[in-house]
Image (tube, helix red, strand yellow):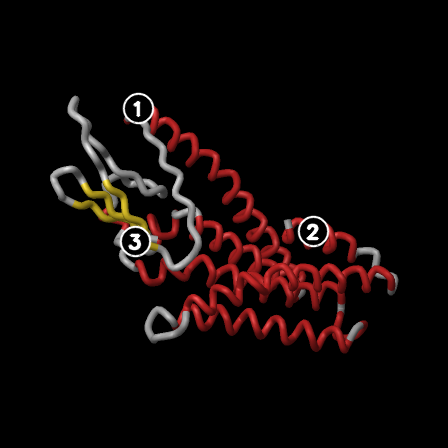
Amino acid sequence: VSQSRYRPDGTALSIGGQAPANQKPIFQRFDAFPITLSTEPEIFYLRVRSQYAVSIPLLFWNIPAYSRAKLIDNLIQVPYFGGILALAAYNLLLFISLRERRYLIYVLFATSIGMGMFSGNGYGHLLLWPNSPDWNSVSQSFFFALSAGFCILFTQDFLRTPQVMPRTNLCLNGLAIFYFLLSLSLALSVSIELPREVIHKLLMVGTLPTGIFLALVAIQSMIKGDASAKYLLLAYRDWET
């Protein structure tokens, strides 16, 4: 998304995901413009461009109220990302201690989904890749595709599908390859010409059916006597919602 604000005198200020973060007039994860008003009627124009569906809620703040609101917003984000980081670190310690593959897969899943949220919330562009607008435009989808692939690998290991459900396991293999190829394509699209819009749509269209399919796999595993599959089923329900 790129945004341009045109002042009444014709000068423009452009910000958004396609511009370097150091060009932001206000260093925040949200796109915000400072506006100086006069006592005379004035007309400001805002142009928004995006390759995807986007909503633009317009809010007007005075400086003290905006600073307070954004400080509170940043503080709210800390326990969320801190929880994901703690979860990944805990499972990494379990992997180091027990050497069980599933814990490493879960670390990769939690890290990739956390990075996807970090990118989508604007912090990635603000703090990690401020001068890489092309990467910023694909980063969220890249990490979410990666997390979907690792989620499927974790399901296979947790439910022992290669041994218990070999035919279903072949379908899961195909799904995992599908998502890893999507993430690879998004990463390559930064340097070579690839149809990003098509890749994004494939990711969006595949999310709900994949979640339903994984839930059905968990149910099938429960029917076969694996009581622990109910915990995965609860996780898939949260994913779909």
Specify the amino acid type for callout 2: Arg
Tell me if label 3 and label 2 are in contact, CB under 8 Å: no
Q: Circle 1: is it few (<14), some (14-19), or many (20+) Cα within 10 Å?
A: few
Query: What residue is drawn where x is 73% and y is 59%?
Result: 215
Q: In the picture shown, does residue 151 fall above or below 167?
A: above
Specify the amino acid type for callout 1: Pro
Q: Which residue is mark 3?
A: 130
Residue 72 location in percent, x, y?
A: 42, 30
Residue 126 location in percent, x, y?
A: 33, 48
Nearest the camera: 233 or 93?
233
Q: In the picture shown, does residue 219 fall above or below 64?
A: below
Q: CA distance from mark 1 to mark 3?
A: 26 Å
Q: Which residue is mark 2?
A: 237
Question: From this viewpoint, is residue 96 visible?
Answer: no
Disc 1, SS: helix
Query: What residue is drawn where x is 81% and y is 63%?
Result: 221
Q: Circle 3: is it few (<14), some (14-19), or many (20+) Cα within 10 Å?
A: some
Q: In the picture shown, does residue 94 fall above or below 45?
A: below
Q: CA distance from mark 1 to mark 2?
A: 41 Å
Disc 3, SS: loop
Q: Which residue is mark 1?
A: 64
Left or right: residue 70 compared with residue 209: left
Nearest the camera: 144 or 241?
241
Disc 2, SS: helix
